Structure formats: structure tokens, C-alpha cells
Image (cartoon, grey):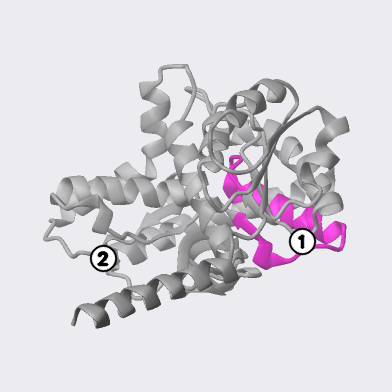
Amino acid sequence: GGAMAALRAAAGALRRGLASAASPTPERKVAVLGAAGGIGQPLSLLMKMSPNCTNLALYDIAGTPGVAADVSHVNTPGPVKGFAGDDELAEALTGADVVIIPAGVPRKPGMTRDDLFKINAGIVKSLVEACGKHCPGAILNMISNPVNSTVPIAAEVLKGLGVYDPRKLLGVTTLDVVRAKTFYADKAGLDVNGVDVPVVGGHAGITILPLFSQATPVANLSADEIDALTKRTMDGGTEVVQAKAGKGSATLSMAYAGALMADSCLRGLNGEAGVVECSYVQSTVVPGLDFFSTKVQLGVNGVDEIMPIGEINAYEQKCLEEMKEELAASIKKGVDFVHSS
């Protein structure tokens, strides 16, 4: 028995050795645009901690040499380099596999996402133009708000450059999922590690629709409790804006969610099977809405498959109807911005 056990152990070690020899971590460059900002700094740190990111390029209009120097001291593999100003943007992007875009101004109390739009739309347009020129094959993860409009802006810009691949443009709605999981687990008394809650729609207010009817494990919550959880998920951003009382919006939880999404994109690129996240993408799931968030399967091309919404209850169906007008208007606003500027 002892000899057999030893042989089995040796065979196992050999298999593991061959597996790691055959597939070292692929070289993957990640660029963060807006890396010196409130989301960008913690996001850059989290990407440095991801074993799937082997080269990190940090870009912003200013401040990035310092952020890069700081992050570069973290004892995980791979170089970190800072790039500041328009002149260095091309170098930051060249060879990037994934580009994460948290650039722009955050929401302040009393600011609507419309106020945000005026400033951030222009920033996103110029950054995505640079992506289209310098890393046309990269997967773009759009964080800059309002995501409902900035993703359509990016699509139109890339179309104009003749390099648009809808599978490689993803609006990051992961924070809505992170919040829905946290709030649901808390209310139901579940271990959050085992919880899944799909979130569909868009990434602002009533366009955010957590599907608690599809949540696992199933919890016995009342209709009122589900309604409260739904509204809390929709208003999660505002909850943080108010709590920070003029000092900004969700940066830390957003950085965490952004890092989760980018890491999933890298794992998909590296051929890992079964990588699924909710994301706001070009979609035909809801007629009349050219962009919509549902679960997507991530793979070597970015989005390999867009999943349907699935079965939803009457409450969720009502919420879905109520969001359509606002989401359609936000999409149109993004498209119109590119064609009028």
C-alpha cells in the first residue's frame, strides 16, 4: 500500500509539474486610464495584486509617476509604469490586452448623472479614440459614469475608426452585483461567499435591476423586504455619496468591483472555462435597447456569449418596463454626443 501511495503521490506531482510547465501565466498587459483618481489608485493596487496581470500601465493627466512608484514596490510579479499627459497615452496603451477606464469626475451631492455627462462624455471620447488607434484589439472595461451613455459613446467612436468589436466593449456593472450580493446575504443571514444575484439593465438608478427571484441560495424574504433590497441596490451609489457628505462617491467598492471584472476578463482571455459576469454590452436581449446588461460568458474574444434575462417574476417585469424609457434615452444621448461633436 505504501509503495502505491508513494507512486500515486509522485504521479500527481509530475502531472502538476507538467501542467505548470505547459501553461505558465500568459503575459497580459493592463492599462488603467485615470489611475491617479479616487477609483484609479485603489484599482491600480488591486490589479497589481492580480496574478493574471503581468504588466501594469498607469495613465492619468497628472500624478501617475507617484502612484506608479508607490504601487511598483508591491512584491508581486510584473512591472508597473506611470504615464502622464497626452504625449504618453500612446505608449501606455500600446500592447494592452485589457484597458480599464475609470477616468472622469465623480458625482458630488446634488449632481445628477446628467451633470456628470457633460464633463465625462468628452473625456471618454478622447480616451477611447486613443484606444482605437493604439490598442484596437484590447478589451475595454468602461467604469466612467454615466456608463449607460459612455459605453454607447465608446461604440460610436470605435465604429468611426473602423475597429469596433462589440465583444470587446464592456460596461462595468459589477458593483451593482457586489452590492446586491452583500445586501441580500446580510438580510437573509447567508454566507455571502456562496451567494449569487444576477443584476440586469443599466448602471444608474431605476435602470439597475437585481433579479432576487433568481438569487441563490433561495431565501424566504417577504415582498416588502425584496422591494427594499431592490431599491437599496438601485440607490447604492447615492447612499455612499451622501455618507461621504461632499467628499466624493464610491471609490473603494468600485475599485474592488472593477478589479473583479478586469480579472475575469483576463481569465477569459487566458482560456479559463466558465467565467461569467454581468456586464452592460451591445445586446439584442431587450428589443429597442441596443445596450443592456445580463450575464455574459467571457472568453478569448471578450464576450463569447450573451445570456438571456431568464425567468423573472411580475415585480421584476414591472421594474424592467419602468427602466426602458430612461435607458433608451441614455443610449441615444451617448450616440448623439459623438455625432454632434
Mark 1 or 2, which is nearer the eye? 1
Instruction: Determine whether the residue tagged by mark 2 lies in a helix, strand or loop.
Output: helix
Q: Give above or below for 290 relative to 262.
A: below
For numbered disc 1, what is the local secondary structure? loop
Disc 2 marks a residue whose amino acid type is Ser
Residue 173, numbered circle: none
The part of the image, by quadrant, that contains residue 138 is: bottom right
The percent position of residue 155, horizontal first and vertical second, equals 73, 57
Q: Is residue 25 left or right of residue 310?
A: right
What is the span of residues highlighted in magenta in the rendered image? Answer: 142-170
Give the Cα separation between the discs numbered 1 and 2.
37 Å
Residue 160 coordinates in the image, percent (x, y): 86, 58
Tell me which residue sits at (88%, 31%) in the image. Answer: 87
Q: Label 1, on which residue?
A: 137
- Residue 313 position (above or below residue 3): above
Q: Which residue is mark 2?
A: 213
Is 245 a magenta residue?
no
Hey, what amino acid is under mark 1?
Gly
